[in-house]
Image (tube, rainbow, N blue to C red):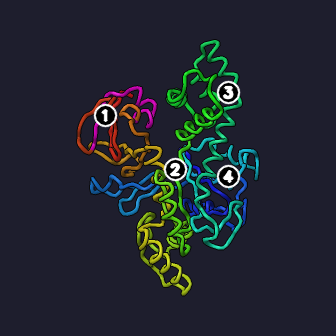
Amino acid sequence: MLVGIVGKPSTGKSTFFKAATLAEAEIANYPFTTIKPNRAIGYVKIECVDKDFNKQCTPRMGFCINHNRFVPIELLDVAGLIEGSYTGAGLGNQFLDDLRQADVLIHVIDISGSVNEKGEAVPALSYDPLKDVQFLEQEINIWFYMLLKKGWDKFARAAKQEGAELFKAVAKQLSGVNVTEDIAEETLKLFPEDITSWTEEQIKNFAKKIREKTKPILIAANKIDVPGSEKNLTRLKEAYPHYMIIACSAMAELELRQKTKDEILNYVPGEETFIIKKTLTEKESKILTYIQKEILEKYHHTGIQNVLNSAVFDFLKYIAIFPGGINNLIDSQGRTLPDCFLMKEGTTALDFAFKIHTDLGKGFVRAVDVKKRLTVGKEHILKHRDVLEIISTK
């Protein structure tokens, strides 16, 4: 799973990325600070199942704080996109290509209106951030359209003259952007059967539908910490009621996580408060007081963790499953509930067995729902936070 972070230059994408990962990423208030894409590990947050067993888990990957399990995911921060990126403007083709393998896109918008359409700094609240929503979506949609058009005439004729299966040709043409045969076939059902009669508008709409299935977009309304930004946030939500829009302050999250790393604070990502451990300087105290009053007390979070969780659980429809034994939750290394796997909704017990190890899947006999102490078969559909023991001949 790969989560892409996109947007205009200077909207705070790299700050968002660094706040979510604490990876080194160059941050500056001028366009195209990021040229090469940055990759690092971020985390989704769930209530850990160790709480259900009155235990404290010891994760092999990720970490757990106060029974909050943080499960690793990969994040990709690409360079800022500007209008006409699909034509190559601002190295746009290169930056779009960096997004090919992303499963979901987080569109970081400067909700304070302090960055114009070119990514240049302007006075706060002087630019209308609502313009950015359609701009970026259009760039991604046209990119898909152009990829599709490269082979359209050829496989459209073949589909009509030779009876070729169009969905297979579409999936092959767009395989580089995660389009499967199932997605292509499902989307084609929404359009006229004779594709040689399609208008350009229908082809563009088809590309848009395909993009929505393979690169869904949610909006991170960043820089909510700038005074006056809340009015833009209200306008944005009113103008786009069907979009998922989450207010966030990457600056605040980065400050809290960095101070926690430096052992100055105790802060659990996604929470609405923090504990001060050491004496603060006057500057530190002023910054943290502002974050507490103007962000955490108003919005109940900085938004960064909420955006990541929404991308994975709401948009991609993943669930978290734990392997474990009905009589023993500890592995051979002495770790308690060491693993947590992110799986697609609809995952069966057999799917999970294969995920853990091919041999477990091949030798599958049955599984046990550890919480319920109930034996289940290979077709049993798993639920979020299930703990499953696999019984296998191998």
Residue 361, position as x, y percentages in the image: 41, 29
Residue drawn at x 68%, y 53% as measured from the top left: 81
SS for callout 2: strand
Asked whether residue 231 appears in the rendered view, the answer is yes
Quadrant position of residue 283: bottom right
The residue identified by callout 1 is: 367
SS for callout 4: loop
What type is the residue that disc 3 sits on?
Trp
Neighbor class of circle 2 (other Cα within 10 Å; few <14, some 14-19, many 20+) is some
From this view, report whether residue 247 is shown above or below residue 199. below
SS for callout 1: strand
Q: Earlier in the sequence, mark 2 or mark 4?
A: 4
Question: 150 or 281, which is in the foreground?
Answer: 150
What type is the residue that disc 4 sits on?
Pro
From this view, report whether residue 309 is shown above or below residue 162. below
Q: What stretch is highlighted in magenta?
A: 352-370
The residue identified by callout 3 is: 152
Real-space CA distance between mark 3 and mark 1, rounded to the nearest whole angstrom: 47 Å
Real-space CA distance between mark 2 and mark 1, rounded to the nearest whole angstrom: 27 Å
Question: 131 or 148, which is in the foreground?
Answer: 131
SS for callout 3: helix
Contact check, label 2 and label 3, Cβ < 8 Å: no
The residue identified by callout 4 is: 37
Residue 320, position as x, y percentages in the image: 40, 46
Residue 330, position as x, y percentages in the image: 35, 48
Q: Which residue lies furthest to the left in this view?
A: 373
Q: Earlier in the sequence, mark 2 or mark 3?
A: 2
Real-space CA distance between mark 3 and mark 4, rounded to the nearest whole angstrom: 30 Å
The residue identified by callout 2 is: 73
